């Protein structure tokens, strides 16, 4: 029986463009990708590739979309304008709260970007098919706002599931599916290794595109209560991600912390770093595959 290799693609907003470089390197090296589990931006890239596994075409389409007028209308540059490239989501949220931007938006609507804009943008990239119709088996995760549980999407309309898994709270609106509302799945499952295993993977390659916490800035300054709360929340998610990654046989780490999470203008750099990180991991992957094959030969999982 052939070993099933899965990619577990984690969140990281614009940094997740590096997932395409990882896939490019793996396909060039003829590493099989039999299953894809994705969350947040990893779910977006994973879905696009799983539907039509031609990575060069995927990169070209994403690049063309990011240069389009529709994408420019999302106004994501307003979030990152004038901010340090190293700022993470929590640091940016703190600045928005401090300046009254977040409070002004959240008091009148549920998100910075409307559902109409969100869906219109994704429709340029995500085909309107069922998840079960993908050429490569695909699994996505969303966070149920009511019960706080992770929801695994393995079938049903792919567009809805992709929107749910990538709906960053406060930036994109919650997505209603079957009477429930979902937001970004990475809040509960930063890298979906366990889902990949449930889908039948014998070996999981996990990809982490945001390996460290955001820059704290001048640590000599006294931290406010809000600073401490947001920093603690970020630390909690980093610890949760570490537990997810520990379940994978192979971890590909792409350090993109010098790129702002909302900066989608650096596709080439992200893809290049993802490609390089995956190339550096090829020997580890080959050894892991060999170990699995030997174990399978002798009757071990």
Image (cartoon, rainbow, N blue to C red):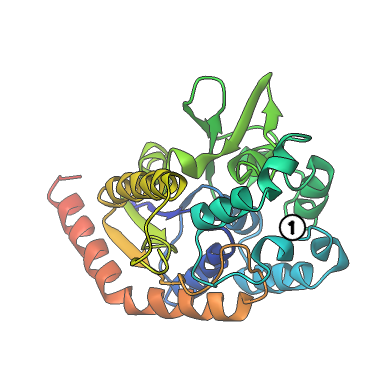
Instruction: Tell me the element at label 1.
Output: loop
**202 or 164: nearer the viewer:** 164
Is residue 195 visible to the viewer in this orientation of the structure?
Answer: yes
Q: Residue furthest right?
A: 69
**112 or 126: nearer the viewer:** 112
| Residue drawn where x is 64% and y is 26% of the image | 181
Quarter of the picture holding the C terminus: top left
Could you tell whether 61 is left or right of 16 in the image?
Answer: right
Q: Residue furthest front?
A: 222
Label 1 crowd bin: few (<14), some (14–19), many (20+), radius 10 Å: some
Is 20 drawn above or below residue 239 in the view shown?
Answer: below
Is 120 drawn above or below residue 108 in the view shown?
Answer: below
| Residue drawn where x is 66% and y is 58% of the image | 52
Q: Which residue is mark 1?
A: 125
| Residue drawn where x is 61% and y is 45% of the image | 168
Q: How many marks?
A: 1
Is 297 drawn above or below residue 132 in the view shown?
Answer: below
Could you tell whether 168 is left or right of 193 in the image?
Answer: right
| Residue drawn where x is 33% and y is 67% of the image | 220
Is residue 153 visible to the viewer in this orientation of the structure?
Answer: no
């Amino acid at each position: 029986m052939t070993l099933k290799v899965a990619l577990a693609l984690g969140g990281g907003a614009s940094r997740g463009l590096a997932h395409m470089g990882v896939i490019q390197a793996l396909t060039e090296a003829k590493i099989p990708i039999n299953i894809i589990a994705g969350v947040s931006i990893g779910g977006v890239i994973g879905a696009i590739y799983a539907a039509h596994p031609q990575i060069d075409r995927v990169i070209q389409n994403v690049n063309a979309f990011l240069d389009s007028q529709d994408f420019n209308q999302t106004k994501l540059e307003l979030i990152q304008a004038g901010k340090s490239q190293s700022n993470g989501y929590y640091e940016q949220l703190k600045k928005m709260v401090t300046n009254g931007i977040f409070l002004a938006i959240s008091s009148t609507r549920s998100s910075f970007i409307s559902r109409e804009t969100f869906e219109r943008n994704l429709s340029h990239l995500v085909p309107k098919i069922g998840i079960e119709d993908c050429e490569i088996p695909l699994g996505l995760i969303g966070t149920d706002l009511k019960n706080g549980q992770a929801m695994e999407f393995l079938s049903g309309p792919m567009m809805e599931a992709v929107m749910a898994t990538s709906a960053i709270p406060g930036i994109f609106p919650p997505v209603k599916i079957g009477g429930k509302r979902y937001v970004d799945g990475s809040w509960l499952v930063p890298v979906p290794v366990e889902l990949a295993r449930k889908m039948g993977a014998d070996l999981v390659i996990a990809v982490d595109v945001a390996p460290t916490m955001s820059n704290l800035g001048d640590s000599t300054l006294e931290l406010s209560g809000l600073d401490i709360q947001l920093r603690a929340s970020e630390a909690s998610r980093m610890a949760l991600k570490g537990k997810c990654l520990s379940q994978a046989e192979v971890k590909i780490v792409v350090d993109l912390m010098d790129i702002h999470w909302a900066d989608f203008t650096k596709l080439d750099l992200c893809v290049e770093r993802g490609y390089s990180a995956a190339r550096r991991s090829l020997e580890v992957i080959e050894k892991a595959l060999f170990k699995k094959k030997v174990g399978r030969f002798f009757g071990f999982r």
